[in-house]
Amino acid sequence: MEKSVILQVRRYRPEAETEPTWQSFEVPFQRDWMVLDALNYIKDRLDGSLTYRWACRMGVCGSCGMMVNGNPVLTCATYVESLLPGPIRVEPLKGFPVIRDLVGDLTDFLAKLERVQPWIVRQDQQVPAAEHLQTPEQLAEYKQYSMCINCMLCYAACPIYELEPAFIGPAAIALAQRYNMDSRDQGAQNRMDVLSQHDGIWSCTFVGECSVVCPKNVDPAGAIQRYKVAATVDWFKSLLLPWGKR
Amino acid sequence: MGKALNPSYKLYHPKWYRRRMPIFWWLGRFSYTKFITRELTSVCVAYSAVVLLVQIWALGRGEDAYRGFVDWLRLPGVLWFHLAVFFIVLLHSITWLNLAPKALVLHLAGRRVPDTVILAGHYLAWLAASGLVAWLLIGT
C-alpha cells in the first residue's frame, strides 16, 4: 500500500508569474481521503498560500470543482485512492480565466445565468390568494434540472464554451429549462427570446460531455436538445399559423 | 509581500490568466475526437446530396448525359470512393439516430415514452424508408 502520493498542482501567482507553473507536493496517503483532503493538507501543512475554493465537502455546494488528471470533477467526491499510483495533476477548471492558483473567475457565468431568468416568472403581478399547487407528476417534469449545483464542471467539459465564450452554456440553459417546465412558471417566452439567439442553444453542437461529467445527473445536453426542438416548433408555428392561434 | 516579479502586475488589480485553446484540443479526449469525427462525416452527407443532384441534372439533360454519369459512377476509383462514402454516411446516420432520444421527449397517457422505444421507432422508420428506396430502384 502507498504511504504517500505526489500531487502536481497548477499554480498561478499573478504578482510573480505571467503564466501558470506546476508545483509538486508529497502528501501522506489515507484511504478515506478525497483530493480535497489532500489539498487541505497542503494548505495546512506545506504551503498556506495555495488558493482554491471549497465549502461543504459533501457534493452539495459545487465550489470545489477542478480538473483532476484532465477531468472536471468535484474534488470532495474524488477519492485519492482511485487515482493511484499518481502523480495526481490538479488544475483550475478549463474555460474560465484564472484569478489565482485553482480559482477561476465565474463572473461571465453569473451574468449569463441572470439573462435566462432562473426564477419563477408570473405574468400576473398580484400576490396569489393561495399557493400554486403542483402534482407529483408536474414536479417530476423539472426535478432533474433543479438538481444543478452550479459547480461549473459542465462548462469545463464543453469545448464550445472555450471556443465561443459568448455561448450561454450548459448549466444556464438547463436551469432555464428547469423553470420552463415548472407548471407555476409563465416566463418561457422571455427565456426563449434569449436562448433562441445564436449564442444560446444554437451554439451547442452536442458534444455531450456536459452530461457525462455532471455530478448530479442533470443532463444539460438533453435539456439543450429539447430546447432546440421546442424552438423549432415555435418557429414553425409562427410561420404557419395565423395570428392569435400560435 | 516579496518583490513583484511580474512587471505588469499592479497591486490589488486582478490579472487573470486566460488559456489559449490548443489547435488539436479535440485529440486530448476520446469523446472530443468522436465528436469531431461525427461532425466531419457531415461532409460526406453533403457530398452524397450533391451527387444525387448531379444525377437528377444529368437525367434532365437526356440519355447521353445520364449514360455518361453512370459510366463515371462505374469507374473503379469512383466505386471505391463511394463505398467509403457509404460507410461514413452510415456511421453519421447511426450516431445521429442514437442521439434522438435526448432531443425527443414524448408522453403517452401521462407517462414518458422510454428512450428505447423512441430509438426503435427511428430505426424502424429508417429501415422502412431504405426499403422503399430499394424497392423503387430494384423492384420496379
Image: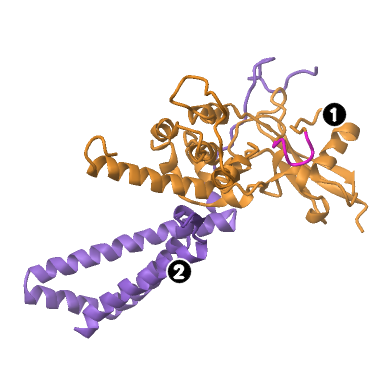
Chain colours: A orange, B purple
> What amino acid does circle 1 point to?
Gly
User: Tag 2, which chain?
Assistant: B
Residue B92 lies, with reference to residue B138, above or below; the image says above
Q: Label 2's element?
A: helix
Q: Residues within 10 Å of mark 2 (few under 14, many from 20)?
A: some
Residue B78 part of the magenta segment: no
Q: In this view of the protein, which residue sits in the foreground, B54 or A167?
A: A167
In the picture, measured across the screen, residue A71 lies left or right of residue B88, that is right
Q: Residue at the location (7% across, 76% down)?
A: B63
Q: Residues within 10 Å of mark 1 (few under 14, many from 20)?
A: few
**Residue B138 at x, y percent in the picture:** 23, 83
Q: Residue at the location (63% across, 49% down)?
A: A217
Q: Which residue is mark 2?
A: B120
**Residue A212 at x, y percent in the picture:** 61, 52
Main SS, magenta residues: loop
Mark 1 or 2: in front is 2
Q: In this view of the protein, which residue sits in the foreground, A17 or A192?
A: A192
In the picture, measured across the screen, residue A192 lies left or right of residue B56, that is right
Q: Residue at the location (60% across, 31% down)?
A: A97
Q: Residue at the location (77% across, 42% down)?
A: A76
Number of callouts: 2
**Residue A113 at x, y percent in the picture:** 54, 30
Q: Which residue is mark 1?
A: A48
Name the residue at the bottom extreme. Answer: B139
Quarter of the image where one finds residue B96: bottom left
Quarter of the image where one finds residue B54: bottom left
**Residue B82 at x, y percent in the picture:** 32, 73
Residue A135 lies, with reference to residue B82, above or below; the image says above
In the picture, measured across the screen, residue A160 lies left or right of residue A230, that is right
In magenta, the rendered stretch is: A56-62
